[in-house]
Amino acid sequence: MVGVSEDGAFEVEKDRSGIVNKTYQMIILPKFYQNCFQNVLKPTQYKMLEILVMLLQFHKTVTREKLATVLPQAILFQSRRKSIQRFLLLPQLSIQFLWFPVVKY
C-alpha cells in the first residue's frame, strides 16, 4: 500500500503475508528425524537446528554470514555468526551420533 506522509514523502507499506504463508507451508523435518534428533541433542541445540533448517529452506543459502544476517536472535552479527559456528562444530552433529540413529530407525 502506498501513501503520502505529512511532509509529502511517499510511504510504502510492505505486504509480508506471502512470506508468512510460505513459512507455514514448509516442512521443517520429518517426524522420525525429529524423534532421533531430540534424543541426541539438548532442547536448545534442537531448537537451533530447527531454526537453521527453516532458514536454509527459506533463504537457500549456506554461508555462515548470510545465515547470521537472518538468524532471529537479538545479539550482534558477530555473536550470531560465532553461535552458528559453535553449533555446527558440536560433536553431537557427527555422523555416528546423529545420522547413524536416523539410518538405523
Image (spheres, rainbow, N blue to C red):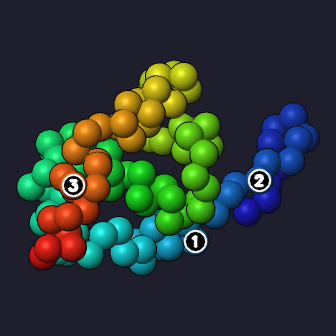
19 to 47, vertically: above or below: below
At label 2, counting other C-alpha atoms closer than 10 Å, the crowd grade (few under 14, some 14-19, many 20 or more) is few
Q: Is residue 38 above or below residue 19?
A: above
Look at label 3 and name its amino acid. Answer: Gln
Find the distance from the CA under tag 3 to the CA under tag 1: 39 Å
Which residue is located at x 77 percent, y 53 percent? 12
> Which residue shows up at 30% across the image and 70% down it?
29
Outermost residue on the left side: it is 39
Q: Nearer the viewer, residue 83 or 22?
A: 83
Judging by the rendered image, the residue that carries numbered circle 3 is 96
Nearer to the camera, 6 or 84: 84
**Horizontal side, residue 34 vs residue 23: left or right:** left
Residue 12's label in the rendered image is: 2
Whole-percent x, y for residue 62 in the image: 58, 52
Residue denoted by label 1: 18
Image point (73%, 63%), residue name:
1
Q: Amino acid at mark 2?
A: Val
Relative depth, front residue between 75 and 63: 63
Separation of residues labelled 2 and 1 (CA atoms):
16 Å
Residue 64: x and y in percent read 56, 40
Q: Is residue 73 visible?
A: no
Looking at the image, is mark 2 or mark 1 earlier in the sequence? 2
The answer to whether the residue labelled 3 contacts the one labelled 2, judged by CB atoms less than 8 Å apart, is: no
